Structure formats: structure tokens, C-alpha cells
Amino acid sequence: MIDARMLAAEGPNGWWLPSGIWDEVIWASLAFAVVMALFFWKGWAPLKAAIARRSDNIREELAAAEHAEAEAAARRAEAQAALGDPAADSRQIIADAHERAAALKADLIARAEADVAASKQRARLEIESSKSQVLADLRAEVSARTIAAAEAVASSNLDDAAHANLIEQYIQQVGQAAGQEAGRA
């Protein structure tokens, strides 16, 4: 440990640097000057070249970035052109859907009208068939009554005037029945 007496025993120091240190200052300054001279002589050119290479690399990277940005903008424009106008496309799709809906509506109406016409035709055919059946039944009934009347006439031995009168009444009854059936149909 350094004793305070020992420190006090040393000689006085100078105002700015301690006395006896000037030799060290001179040699350190000379060494610094030699190192700096060697640095400028051998190290400055490589350092300057490295700085220039770094600056060139930065410029190239900036140019590449600008080129990439321009290329991206061109691709974005191409993509937008390829996509077209989505609003116009959606309007076209909606218009096509309305056209298809109108065509489908017209087709369904035409089918319904055709079904109605076919149903009416079937109803007419059924009416005609029923009418024919009724007339056939009426004819059968008339025939049966005629035969029954003929048997009654034959069995009762009517005279000619009574026979003509009976036939005339029967024809009137059949005519009235046929007229009533025709009126119902």
C-alpha cells in the first residue's frame, strides 16, 4: 500500500504534466505519427475502396429496389387488367340472372298454359264420352221400352187405331226424354 509519506516524498509536479514525462510525450507523439503515416500510406486506399464499394452496393440495392417496385406496379396493373372491373362483372352476372329468371318464368307460364289446355281437352273428351254413354243408355232404354210396348201390343191384340195411337205416344215420350237429356248436356 502506498503510504502518504511516500507520495509526499516525491518531487513537485508540473503545472500541466508531471515533470520528467516529456520524454514519454515525445516518443508517444512520434509513434502516433508513424502509425498514422502508415495508416494513410497503406490503409487509406483500401478503406476508401471499401467505402466506395459499400456506396456502390447501396446504390445498386436502391436501383434494384426501384426496379422491383416498378415491376411490382406493372404486375399489379396487369393483374387488375386481367381481373377487369369487378363491379361491371357483378352487374353483368346480375343482368344474366334476371334474363334467365325471365326466360324460366316465361317457360313455366307456357307449360302451365299447355297443362291447362290439355286438362280442358281431357274434360271435353270426358264430356263427349259421358254424352255418348248417356245416349247409348237412352237408346238401350228406348229399345227395351219399345220391345216391352210391342210385347204389350202383341199380347193385348189392339186394333190398328189403338196401335197407331200407342206408337205415337211412345215416340213423343222418347222425343221428350231425348230433348231433356240433350238440354242437360
Image (spheres, grey):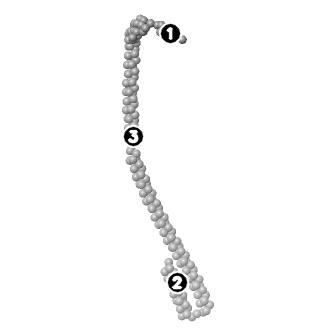
Say whether residue 127 is left or right of residue 32. Answer: right
Q: Are marks 1 and 2 in contact (CB under 8 Å)?
A: no
Query: Given the image, on which type of amino acid does mark 1 rest?
Result: Arg
Instruction: Please state which of residues 98 and 56 is positioned toward the viewer in this rendering.
Output: 56
Q: Is residue 170 visible?
A: yes
Q: Which mark is residue 48?
A: none
Looking at the picture, does residue 77 appear above or below residue 63? below
Residue with the mark numbered 3: 80
Please give the count of numbered marks on the rendered protein.
Answer: 3
Q: Is residue 34 visible?
A: no
Say which quarter of the image contains residue 64.
top left
**Marks 3, 1: nearer the viewer:** 1
**Marks 2, 3: nearer the viewer:** 3
Instruction: Please state which of residues 146 and 82 is positioned toward the viewer in this rendering.
Output: 82
Instruction: Please state which of residues 151 and 9 is positioned toward the viewer in this rendering.
Output: 9
Describe the element under mark 2 as helix, strand or loop.
Answer: helix
What residue is shown at x 54% (from left), y 11% (from top)?
Answer: 1
Q: Earlier in the sequence, mark 2 or mark 3?
A: 3
Query: Given the image, on which type of amino acid does mark 3 rest?
Result: Gln
Q: State the image coordinates of residue 156 (x, y, percent, origin top left).
A: 61, 92
Q: Earlier in the sequence, mark 1 or mark 2?
A: 1
Looking at the picture, does residue 59 appear above or below residue 4? below
Q: CA distance from mark 2 to mark 3?
A: 87 Å
Residue with the mark numbered 1: 5
Task: Please identify the residue farthest to the right as the structure is shown.
Answer: 155
